[in-house]
Image: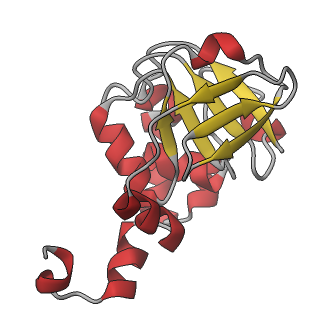
């Protein structure tokens, strides 16, 4: 079971990882440096308390703002296993998939959880269950190609796995 962190609407990429930390990543290129500062401006205790496998449940427009790919990198490096939100900024959603971080859209999900609840997520079936309350949320299952990218750990590992031929990618 995953422990839940609940966040509100309009959490920007700057709220996920502040711009002042991007230089650390460019110099060190170590995602763990970003993880130390993940969600810092939204919840200063997050990076110190997050544990492997934790899940973020959020409101509308999660990942809005700039298109910085470091935002999902920071969350994945902080060991977040998935994000379920009422809606996502499109570029954040795609950057998350590219980084191998599962993201599920589920209207009304934020009202069904509170921080500290336990969650169980079935990506293939599109089920998000609050194991603390027993409430179940149904979302559209992720398409097979997205599941394949996530299983590979992200877009680059996926492309390495299937080969670099455009004939393979664009059949």
Give how far across and how far down residue 105 sits, in percent: 46, 31
Quarter the C terminus occupies: bottom left
- Which quadrant of the structure image shows residue 47? top right
User: Which residue is drawn at the image coordinates 68% and 21% (left, top)?
Assistant: 6
- Which quadrant of the structure image shows residue 31? bottom right
User: Which residue is drawn at the image coordinates 56% and 32% (left, top)?
Assistant: 84
Give how far across and how far down residue 114 sits, in percent: 77, 16
In the foreground, 34 or 124: 124
Residue 5 left/right relative to 137: right
User: Vertically, is 121 above or below 170?
Assistant: above
User: Vertically, is 50 above or below 11?
Assistant: below
Residue 166 left/right relative to 129: left
Res. 67 in view: no
In the foreground, 32 or 135: 135
User: Which residue is drawn at the image coordinates 48% and 62% (left, top)?
Assistant: 150
Res. 142 in view: yes
Quarter the N terminus occupies: top right
Give how far across and how far down residue 134 sits, in percent: 82, 24
In the foreground, 56 or 104: 104
Give how far across and how far down residue 131 sits, in percent: 83, 31
Colour convention of the picture:
secondary structure
In the foreground, 20 or 113: 113
User: Which residue is drawn at the image coordinates 58% and 45% (left, top)?
Assistant: 75
- Which quadrant of the structure image shows residue 32? bottom right
């Amino acid at each position: 079971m995953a422990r839940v962190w609940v966040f509100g609407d309009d959490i920007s990429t700057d709220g996920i990882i502040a711009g002042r930390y991007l230089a650390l990543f460019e110099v060190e290129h170590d995602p763990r440096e970003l993880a130390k500062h993940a969600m810092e401006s939204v919840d200063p205790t997050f990076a110190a308390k997050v544990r492997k496998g934790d899940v973020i449940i959020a409101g509308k427009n999660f990942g809005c703002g700039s298109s910085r790919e470091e935002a999902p990198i920071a969350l994945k490096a902080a060991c977040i296993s998935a994000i379920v939100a009422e809606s996502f900024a499109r570029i954040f959603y795609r950057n998350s998939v590219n980084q191998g971080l599962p993201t599920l859209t589920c209207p009304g999900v934020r009202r069904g959880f509170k921080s500290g609840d336990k969650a169980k997520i079935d990506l293939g079936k599109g089920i998000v269950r609050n194991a603390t309350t027993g409430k179940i949320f149904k979302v559209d299952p992720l398409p097979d190609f997205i599941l394949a990218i996530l299983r590979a750990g992200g877009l680059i590992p996926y492309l390495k796995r299937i080969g670099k031929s455009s004939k393979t990618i664009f059949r």
